[in-house]
Image (tube, helix red, strand yellow):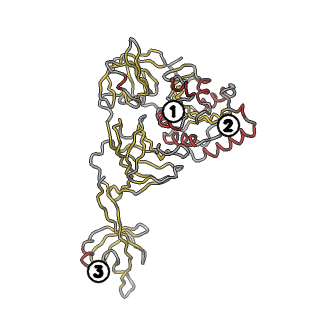
Amino acid sequence: MNVSKKIINVVLLGHIDHGKTKLAEKLSEKISTAGLDKHPEEQERGISIDIGFTAFELKEYLITLVDAPGHADLIRNVVAASSISDAAILVIAVDEGPMIQTGEHIVILDSFKIHNVIIALNKIDLVKNDIIQKRIDEIKNLLKETSFPNAPIIPISAEKDIGIEELKKALYSILSSPKRQTDGPFKMPIDHAFPIKGTGTVITGTIHRGKITIGDKIEIMPLKIPIKIKGIQIFKEPVQSAKAGDRVALAISRLDYHKIERGYYACSPDSLKISKNLIIKGKVNSLFKKVIKSGIRVHITVGMPTVSAIIYPFKIENSKNILLEKISSNEEFYAYLQLDKHVTTEIGEQCLISRLELPPTTLRIVGNGIIENSEPSDIELYKESSRKGTLRSIKNQNDLVVRYVIDGLSKSKFGAEKLLNKEIYTENGKKGKILSPFGTKGGVIAKFKEKPDENIIVYLKKYKKVKI
């Protein structure tokens, strides 16, 4: 295995029993951590339950194949596998066609901005040609609204070894060397930790950023435990150093592997934060048809870990964080998230929001976002309410407007006096300011930056601080 080649990480996705692991078997030349259903429970159940890593050479590339489990209950592992990948092979069995989990996988790829995708239309030995064409048309229609509408669709049979070379050619055609962050602090999410006799604890992962060399001092987050690198391997080949994009095994000093969980990070000292509250800027997936209400429990994936959290969506208006009662399909929003446990974060990191407690017969990926603040200590959220009034103009004898009067914002002159200098908005968005009371029945005189329409509805917004 030539580890000096350009390394590309390709996630292998597919619904359970659509032939994903069989395809990995056909493609792979070298097996790494948890490759090809080696877990005892996987052998017993006949399904993938963990992320598997294998590799094969494709001209100038060394492809790291990240085999994600297809079972609906293991969607967390699918998200974790996608978070470290550059490209994807999505396996769809021709006899069953796209399933709910296929839709989830497409949304996950879109959320992580994985645009280099090919479709492996598997099990073509089981059906006639007209069924194959029908499935191809279905898949093209399914991909129309994604960021990869023209993804190649390659008919194959992993079982009968049909179309494998065509699949490799199609994969090669969509690949390009991704831009790696080789500068900056070292950062690697850990996917496995285990002991090796005579070596000690070994951690494996795909380097997100920076470089690592034997002898370097790093730390394990969120444990904040300093360690030293004793050895580095790339697919069991010893190397002196590794860089962003490489899949590595690191032999480390003085740390029991039992203390390390998937989703912990190996990183440069003091480069990452530990957070339990986050502010994100996000968007609801257009295919998610349910409403997300403020204060509801969701699942948030940051890097590899997925944790439960309470979500408080809000918008920013007049320099205030205005709490939204709900968010729905395709809506953009900010959100304050209270997590059930601490996670390792940094500003600008991608995250995914899901509702994993929903049945797998429905799409569970809510949307995605970017972390804007990983240490929000004293966020202020406000509830918005509004009063409605009606605008009328008072004209002079030359039919020129001399003042704008709004009725209905207050019931008395005393109440109107409390509204001085308050901002108001017409229903078509023109801004104004209250200057003085008018009359004895609560009317007010207002000034507008742009000429308002006659008899238009005017709103006075009020904000009340919310305790959460």
Indicate the amino acid at tag 2: Val
- Give the spatial CA distance, label 3 vs label 2: 74 Å
Indicate the amino acid at tag 1: Asp
Q: Please tell me the numbered disc located at residue 164.
A: none
Badge 2: residue crowd in 10 Å (few <14, some 14–19, many ≥20): many
Residue 461: image location, x then y, percent: 34, 66
Lower position in the chain sequence, tag 3 or tag 2: 2
Residue closest to the eye, 43 or 12: 43
Q: Are marks 1 and 2 in contact (CB under 8 Å)?
A: no
Residue at coordinates 40% horizontally, 47% vertically from top-left? 297
Residue at coordinates 75% horizontally, 36% vertically from top-left? 128
Lower position in the chain sequence, tag 1 or tag 2: 1
Q: Which residue is mark 1?
A: 86
Question: Helix or strand or loop: what does disc 1 sit on?
Answer: loop
Q: Which residue is mark 2?
A: 94
Q: Which residue is mark 3?
A: 438
Q: Is residue 153 left or right of residue 399?
A: right
- Image quadrant where one finds the N terminus: top right
Residue 110: image location, x then y, percent: 52, 42
| Residue 6 visible in rendering | no
Q: Is 387 placed above or below 158 here?
A: below
